[in-house]
Image (cartoon, grey):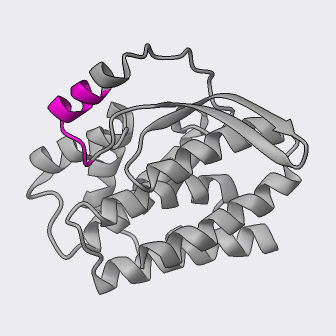
Amino acid sequence: MLVQLVRPLVRTQVQMLTKAQSASGKLVGMVSQWLGYLGIHAEVTQLHTTGDRIQVSLCVGKPEQCTEAEWQQILNNLNQDKNATIEADALAYAAMSPTQQSKVQRLLASILQASGQDPLEEWVSLRLRLAALGMDESMLVGIQSALKVPMPMEILVEQLEPEVAAFVLSKAIHIALLDHQISQAEDTALKALLNAVDHKVVA
């Protein structure tokens, strides 16, 4: 299921990249996002073309499946300092309009509700796990509020901007995998979101 979701998303982003005015900036964000699907936190520090290839330099953080002790040992073994990173020119939550942020919050709340559990009942522990996925305080507050007034996914994906849809889908995949499995309801919700992304790019 994860491969079926990620590959079409990568294809969608490739199509977006061919139409982007700032292709290098968008590719920087996409590379980090693709690695994020594997639980690898990475930032692009350098990107340039070499013939018919693209050369990318990365600054990689601790993978989700790696313990602190293991990561520290790896760093010690490599004996390598962190490289300076550059800011990715990609649509970030903080750069979104209030309306776009509200859409993100409601969509992510819908994914949480698709798990079959009551997210509000376990919000204290769930909030910590969402924060670990890179969600800031304002996003978390918005998601919590959206959980109190649920909306159907099919309504939420209407008139959804492609970059916002791609941002939400990357977060939604991580949320769906919090319990290491994807339920039928989560599968349906993710497909609806993916279809919205594909539709907006192809249209």
Quarter occupied by residue 196: bottom right
Vertical arrangement, residue 67 with respect to residue 110, above or below: above
Magenta span dominant secondary structure = helix
Coordinates of residue 35 in the picture (x, y in percent):
50, 49
Coordinates of residue 60 in the picture (x, y in percent):
45, 33
Q: Considering the image in quadrants, where does the C terminus appear?
A: bottom right
Q: Nearer the viewer, residue 137 or 181?
A: 181
Residue drawn at the location 68% of the way across and 36% of the way down: 56
* Relative side of 182 to 55, left or right: left
Q: Is residue 170 visible?
A: yes
Q: Which residues are magenta?
A: 65-74
Q: Nearer the viewer, residue 106 or 43?
A: 43
Q: Is residue 99 visible?
A: no
Quarter occupied by residue 13: bottom right
Vertical arrangement, residue 5 with respect to residue 143, above or below: below
Residue drawn at the location 30% of the way across and 24% of the way down: 77
* Relative side of 114 to 158, left or right: left
Q: Is residue 125 magenta?
A: no
Q: Nearer the viewer, residue 60 or 22?
A: 60
